[in-house]
Structures are given as structure tokens and as C-alpha cells.
Image: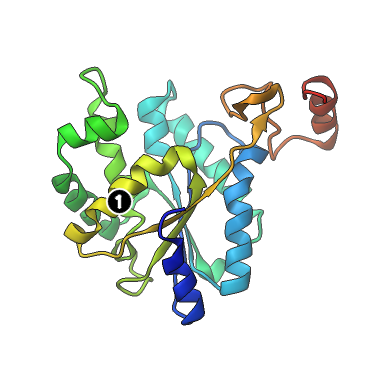
Amino acid sequence: HRDFEKILYCIRSRRTFYLYPGRGPSSSSMHIGHSVPFILCKYLQDVFSAPFVIQITDDEKFLCKDLPLEEARSNGIENIKDIIAYGFRPELTYIFSNYESSHLFYRNTLKISKLVSLNEAMKVFGFDLNTNIGMVEFPAKQIAASYASSFCFLPPGTPCLIPCAVDQDPYFRLARDKAYGMGEEKPSTLYVSMLPGLQGTHRKMSASSLKSAIYLSDSPSEVKRKVSRLAFSG
């Protein structure tokens, strides 16, 4: 974790904090590996009545995957249905698509973009001269949602807790680095383990491999078939 103590202080002092996971809709259904941060967020919302902000990064999947824009948007809509099914409280939950983001969110995206040099982005994210400019711009969007001022329904300065897989750490390290320049609270992160794929512990469950994942849309018979035929045994 990073700065989780700040969230514990909020809990002890009964101060509000908000939860922010993201979802990159690379397929039309989420798999059980994607469930881990959402299950954690559901628990935290139930216990602490924490506002819950979910960013659907449909733009990023269009930019970095071989997906038509309409397919990326459609996948995002289907993934939102999966997220709603966890039972989050509607009055404390806000789901938004980057493709259709709000004006406050876009303003912060612009400010963050101005604070991050191309040289810094290349070092943090591994961009090179062949990276498309949309991918170079994208990190500012993922960072923006970790600042409360991106959302009109959050009080200024509300701390942010981000339950996520460790592969998202570069984005939120940079978010913490730029918080002072934005006049914002540094977001806190809580890292969850990646669920291994059905083919073994040597690789994570991935939506890009049908044989490695159990999807939330799979029928009980399909889950049974995958576990009996594909899952590794001890």
C-alpha cells in the first residue's frame, strides 16, 4: 500500500474518503480476476458508507488494443452491468466513461497534462517514439479521477483510496507526485493480488485469453467445464 495510514486516520476521525477503482473494458464481460478490487470496494462501502467512483477507460482500450471505438464503448457498457451486479449503493456510486467524461474531469486532465513532461512520461510508462499520442495523453485521465475536484459531488480535499493491482502503481505514483502542484490530497493505494489464470500460477488471469479466465457471464455448466478441463491441479 501507499499512505493507507491516512485512510485509517479518516476512519478513526470519521472523515469521508472515496473509493476509486478503474475498469479497462477489453472484453464484453469481466472475469473473476477483475472481481478482487470490486469485492473489496463493496465491503468498504458497506462498512464506511464511502462514495464509490468507477472510471471506465474505453478510450484507452481503443488506443492500445486492436478494438474499434464502438466495440470498446459497447464493452464498457457491458462491464458496467457486471459492476452494478455487485450491489453497490446507487446514491453513493458514480460510474463514468472517459469517452463521455465531465467538464470538471477534463479541466483536471488538462492541468495534469501540463505538469507532466514527455520525458517524465516516457520514463514512467515506457513510451517510445512509436507510441501513439493518444496513449501518451491517457495517464492524465487515469490520474485525474484520483483527485476529488474532478467530481462536483465530492467535497474539496476528500481523500481518495484506490484498491488496484500492483501493475497500476506507475499511474498513482505519478498522481501522488503531482498532487502538490494540483493543490490536491495525495491519493492512497491498496494493492490486491492478481488471480492466476486457469493454466497455472505462472501468469495472471487475462481477458485476452479465453482459456485462462472464468467470466462473470459464464453459465454454471461453462464454469464447471473450464475448471474440470482447463484448470491446473495439485
Coloring basis for residues: rainbow
Q: Looking at numbered disc 1 in the image, what kind of residue is underneath it?
A: Ala
Identity of the residue drawn at 23% across and 30% down: 122
User: Which element is circle 1 on?
Assistant: helix
Identity of the residue drawn at 19% across and 45% down: 113
Identity of the residue drawn at 40% across and 62% down: 160
Percent x, y of residue 218: 74, 34
Q: Is residue 2 above or below residue 89?
A: above
Q: Tell me the quarter of the picture where residue 147 sits.
A: bottom left
Identity of the residue drawn at 36% across and 59% down: 187
Question: What residue sits right under mark 1 in the picture?
Answer: 175
Residue 18 seen by the camera? yes
Q: Is residue 136 left or right of residue 205?
A: left
Q: Which residue is at the front of the view, 117 or 24?
A: 117
Percent x, y of residue 194: 59, 38
Q: Is residue 131 above or below residue 148?
A: above
